[in-house]
Amino acid sequence: MRVVGPTLPSAVRPRRRLRRTAAGVLSAVMLAAAAGLVHPGRSASADATFDSDLVALLNQDRAANGLAPLQWNDTLGSIAESGGYGGCGFPISGRAVDMVQRNYFSHVIPGCGGQNVFNVMQSAGVPFRSAGENIGWLSGESDPAAAAATLHRMFMNSPDHRANILNPSYTHVAIGSATAASWSGGGSQVSNVIVTAEEFAQLPPDAASSGGPAPSPSAPPTAGYWLAGRDGGVFAFGNAPFLGSAGNVRLQAPVVGISRTGDGGGYWLVASDGGVFTYGNAAFHGSTGANHLNAPIVGIAATPDGGGYWLVAADGGVFAFGDAAFHGSTGAVHLNAPIVGIAATPDGGGYWLVASDGGVFTYGTAAFQGSTGAARLNAPIVGTAAAPDGSGYWLVAADGGVFSFGGAPFLGSTGAMRLNQPITRIAPRTAGSGYWLVASDGGTFSFGDAPFEGSTGGQRLNAPIVAASGH
């Protein structure tokens, strides 16, 4: 499987499978990115010589084609061979061991809701910008060096597998293998089989060969974010301080948005009735909590100095408070789809409204840079965010597809991944070039230089996550 195309519907190249009397190979490629980093130790191979020979052989072919050698990565090594994974609802081993233990041969993990190695990488915190996998099996060869040479030759004779090995973007690799006296996962009963998984990844420049640098326990995080639940619960990660929540308050209406103050010392929560809740140095400037609204509030955006904010309703009605100036709305316009978000320009002189079909409406100093209003989407748009310099904006869909316009760079998406829960918001890093995507279970996916600082993806929540803001 080859997945390409970061925004509009992806192009998919079919898997290629080679059948031989006593061997088989499959390949998969994914362009995506994920968050964070963990450092499990490297597990023992079924045969260390076999694994190291495969690494040497693929690097020889890379050198012959003018490419840099791939470095070993311990995290990928654990995934490739015997490291555990709990994202299926039951424990499984690494790729090679799992294929032997559960008698199958596929990129798709059986009984795991369609998940594959890219979901495992994401769960393990591998910060891959692109990644690929080759899997193969061989039987009847007792010499590890000969087995490695045979399997590598099969890979290089297959266009899809060769493309993984010679991908100039990849920086790291790991190989896992497992043996069995008898195995039928490849479609027929074979004896003395070795099953192999080659995991490739493009990792950031600061990712070490040992699995990437672990931050010093005493070093403070350099970025962070808040997640907000529909019940008003707030979850703070990284350097984003927890300043309070409405999680223990009986609300008249569910929370739908969160916005930070300019210095990050506070935040506002807004409910669907326009009720506004303030924390830290976020001042109360007014709300629509006591007003009769034609449509529910769906988002909030603050002015750069924190002296005001805008609320936007599903019909595009805009309500301005404090020093936030009213520049216009779609409240009196017939819309093809409801408004789902608002983003302010960094100078505070304008804002963008975005609808669920990706239609974009601009006001004040907010420039129109494009939209998906005329495009056929795989999933509805659920949020928008402005580039820190105001030169463009991102739209995000419920499947994690990211659409970038103007000077907002495309840094990756989850559009080609199978998600446990839909994406609900995008939050840009306030300094630098990166963004986070957040799912309704609090799963957090980081792209660009936005670091992974934690999530609620593995927690039991009282209410789904509906909003996020970068610190």
Image (tube, rainbow, N blue to C red):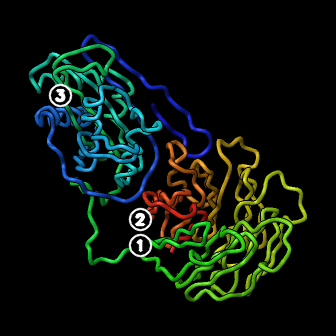
The residue labelled by disc 2 is: 454
Quadrant that contains the N terminus: top left
How far is disc 1 from disc 2 in space, using C-alphas? 7 Å
- The CA span between labels 3 and 1 is 42 Å
Asked where in the image residue 306 lies, by quadrant, the reply is bottom right
First in residue order: circle 3 vs circle 1 = 3
Amino acid on which the number 2 mark rests in the picture: Gly
Whether residue 424 is situated above or below residue 388 in the rendered picture: above
Of the two numbered discs 2 and 3 on the same chain, state the one appearing first in sequence. 3
Label 2, residues with CA under 10 Å away: few <14, some 14-19, many ≥20: some
Of circles 3 and 1, which is in front? 3
Q: Nearer the viewer, residue 222 or 239?
A: 239
Mark 3: which amino acid? Thr
Q: Which residue is drawn at 52% across and 42% down?
A: 416
> Disc 1 residue type?
Gly
Residue 150 coordinates in the image, percent (x, y): 20, 21
Residue at image x 23%, y 26%? Answer: 152
Check residue 238 in the rendering and tell me which mark sits there, or answer none.
1
Q: The residue tagged with tag 2: helix, strand or loop?
A: loop
Could you tell me which residue is drawn at 25 percent across and 31 percent down? 101
| Mark 1 surroundings within 10 Å by alpha-carbon count, few (fewer than 14), some (14 through 19), many (20 or more) | some
Question: Is disc 3 surrounded by few (<14), some (14 to 19) or many (20+) residues within 10 Å?
Answer: many
Confirm whether residue 447 shows in the render.
Answer: no
**Residue 280 image point, x, y percent:** 55, 87
Of pointers 1 and 2, the one earlier in the residue sequence: 1
Q: Is residue 3 left or right of residue 311?
A: left
Relative vertical location of residue 340 with respect to residue 146 in this rendering, above or below = below
Residue 83 in the image, given as x and y percentages of width and height:
25, 45
Q: Where's residue 392, x and y in %?
A: 64, 62
Local SS, label 3:
strand
Residue 233 makes an appearance in the image:
yes
| Residue labelled with disc 3 | 179
